[in-house]
């Protein structure tokens, strides 16, 4: 459908108002919210992710696209819920203790929401104990941790150790991300997964939950 | 005075590669206190810098613990400090920003480095350290770069969004930030030390080189020119992350020594810095200091120096070291580099 391709293109260009207007137009015309999400928003954000990785797009443009996606999701989410679409799983997100950077975490949240996950965002500067409390309260399938600094990434290890000591490690899969971390670091600290960017995080989470091979 | 670093900064052959580990919050560890406590206490802070020199013997010292906070705090942003024995580094979170994107930049207060926030404290530490070590080792006051300071004033995500939606407003914010930084930098010169500029929020991991050129280059050059006109010869501009894509514009800033972080392409830095006759600091991967053996760390340090192919403007450094980084690891790297150089001669 031409309008879905346009949504994807406008999303890529970060044109918030146009994405919202087209979403409304399609919804009013009776299009399936799930189709708008998959073939418009997610398709557009996949291109954004590829362009970010190849250096064609940088964070300011990506944030505009994410903002457009967030606004469109605001229209689609109630409709998806009405259709009886169940969340694919609960994801508990937080930036680790001592770290005040939340851009990456917020992008991951938007992307996972778009992919059908329920997001529980603990915010930034989250202590290991708060992560434990979040797990016991919300029972997520996935815990996502973010760190932007070499000086705070070590708190990911502390958080995993604290979750393990609380006897909760077997209940959740843990995925990490952020500028200084890597797959190697994820392996070293005992995380289950690592994602280089917000778009790839969706695939990693699905993979961890065996929703996608 | 440390001639090794002076030679490297002049891109002249020296006896050994200078070693400049990035020690900021780690300074507090040297005096057994938390960063939140030390960065607000002139006596502890001074003692911590002197202890750093005594134990690590770096080729230069930097006056700064929570480097990016000082200017924005002096304008009115709220820094989160940590109580008790919490060793987290003080920082300005999104809620600490004072400017919410309206058009009233004129209402932002221009701080006086002699009076506002912790600027006077940092300057006093600089004066005291210069008095004790000024003849032995270069001492540089840490200042923010304009983009990083503006990120604290409005919040990083908000600033990145504004670069697309309101670039004119961003230019005004950066001009204001540059003026604050110039005044603070000149106050460091009056205190008897040099200046080191940090602007990692402007890294090409976040901003495109084109955006850097359009928005950040001008204010950055303005700061550097102003410091140069006041007699400062060596001005490091530290931008972390993989800055290879922005190397051209990085060199255009006029900083005579720049950073090649662990993720950046050292071959590109060697080629371009050599043509431009600029020094650069190549960082070891910070996480190595906490996860590999001392022997492995020594080998990595030697390999990193070997990568320099004898370029005289090469300086060995580290990313920002976490609080509690074992002293033995720092000493091992320093000694490995010195022994390696000794064997070559």
Image (cartoon, coloured by chain):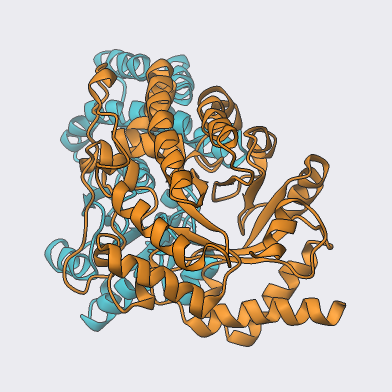
Chain colours: A cyan, B orange
A87, above or below A129, in the image? above
In the rendered structure, the answer to whether residue B47 lies left or right of residue A97 reads right
Q: Does the rendering let one see residue B49?
A: yes
Identify the residue shown where x is 20% and y is 80%. A166
Residue B80 vs residue B13, the one in the foreground:
B13
Identify the residue shown where x is 52% and y is 35%. B207
Identify the residue shown where x is 36% and y is 59%. B125
* Rendered-image quadrant of the C terminus of chain B: bottom right
> Quadrant of residue A26 in the image?
top left
Q: Give the percent coordinates (x, y) of residue B344.
A: 86, 77
Residue furthest right in the image:
B345
In the rendered structure, the answer to whether residue B245 lies left or right of residue B241 reads right
Identify the residue shown where x is 32% and y is 75%. A158
A170, above or below B164, in the image? below
A19, above or below B186, in the image? above
Residue furthest left in the image:
A137
Residue B112 vs residue B210, the one in the foreground:
B112
In the rendered structure, the answer to whether residue B326 lies left or right of residue A117 reads right
Q: Give the percent coordinates (x, y) of residue B30.
A: 39, 77
* Rendered-image quadrant of the N terminus of chain B: bottom right
Residue B110 vs residue A34, the one in the foreground:
B110
Total tally of numbered discs in the picture: 0
Q: Does the rendering let one see residue B290?
A: no
Q: Give the percent coordinates (x, y) of residue B183.
A: 40, 35
């Amino acid at each position: 459908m031409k309008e879905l391709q346009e949504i994807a293109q406008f999303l890529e260009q970060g044109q918030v108002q146009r994405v919202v207007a087209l979403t409304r137009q399609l919804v009013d015309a009776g299009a399936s919210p799930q189709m708008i999400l998959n073939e418009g928003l997610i398709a557009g954000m996949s291109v954004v992710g590829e362009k970010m990785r190849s250096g064609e797009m940088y964070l300011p443009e990506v944030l505009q696209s994410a903002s457009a996606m967030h606004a469109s999701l605001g229209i689609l989410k109630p409709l998806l819920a009405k259709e009886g679409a169940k969340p694919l799983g609960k994801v508990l997100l937080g930036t680790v203790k001592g770290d005040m950077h939340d851009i990456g975490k917020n992008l991951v949240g938007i992307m996972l929401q778009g992919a059908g996950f329920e997001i529980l965002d603990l915010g930034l500067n989250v202590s290991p104990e708060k992560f434990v409390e979040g797990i016991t309260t919300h029972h997520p399938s996935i815990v996502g941790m973010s760190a932007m600094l070499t000086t705070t990434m070590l708190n990911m290890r502390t958080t995993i150790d604290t979750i393990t000591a609380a006897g909760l490690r077997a209940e959740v899969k843990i995925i990490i991300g952020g500028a200084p971390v890597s797959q190697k670091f994820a392996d070293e600290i005992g995380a289950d997964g690592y994602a280089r960017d917000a778009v790839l995080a969706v695939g990693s989470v699905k993979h961890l939950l065996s929703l996608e091979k | 005075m440390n001639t090794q670093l002076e030679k490297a900064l002049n891109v002249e052959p020296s006896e050994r590669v200078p070693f400049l580990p990035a020690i900021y919050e780690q300074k507090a560890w040297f005096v057994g206190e938390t960063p939140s406590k030390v960065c607000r206490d002139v006596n502890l802070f001074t003692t911590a810098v002197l202890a750093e020199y005594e134990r690590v013997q770096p080729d230069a010292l930097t006056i700064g613990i929570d480097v990016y906070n000082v200017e924005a705090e002096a304008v009115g942003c709220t820094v989160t400090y940590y109580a008790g024995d919490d060793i987290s580094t003080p920082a300005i979170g999104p809620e600490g920003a004072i400017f919410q994107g309206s058009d009233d930049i004129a209402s932002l207060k221009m701080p006086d480095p002699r009076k506002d926030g912790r600027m006077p404290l940092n300057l006093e530490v600089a004066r005291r350290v210069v008095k004790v070590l000024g003849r032995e080792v270069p001492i540089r006051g840490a200042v923010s770069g304009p983009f990083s300071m503006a990120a604290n004033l409005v919040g990083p995500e908000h600033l990145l969004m504004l670069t697309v939606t309101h670039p004119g407003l961003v230019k005004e914010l950066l001009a204001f930030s540059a003026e604050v930084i110039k005044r603070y930098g000149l106050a460091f010169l009056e205190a008897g030390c040099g200046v080191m500029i940090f602007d990692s929020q402007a890294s090409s991991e976040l901003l495109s080189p084109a955006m850097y050129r359009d928005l950040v280059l001008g204010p950055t050059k303005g700061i550097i020119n102003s410091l140069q006109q006041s007699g400062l010869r060596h001005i490091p501009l530290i931008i972390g992350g993989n800055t290879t894509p922005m190397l051209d514009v990085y060199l255009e800033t006029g900083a005579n020594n720049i950073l090649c972080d662990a993720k950046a392409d050292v071959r590109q830095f060697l080629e371009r810095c050599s043509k431009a006759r600029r020094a650069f600091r190549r960082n070891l991967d910070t996480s190595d200091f906490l996860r590999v053996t001392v022997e492995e760390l020594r080998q990595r340090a030697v390999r990193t120096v070997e990568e320099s192919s004898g370029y005289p403007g090469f300086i060995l450094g580290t990313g920002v070291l976490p609080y509690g980084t074992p002293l033995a690891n720092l000493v091992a790297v320093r000694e490995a580099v010195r022994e390696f150089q000794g064997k070559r001669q």
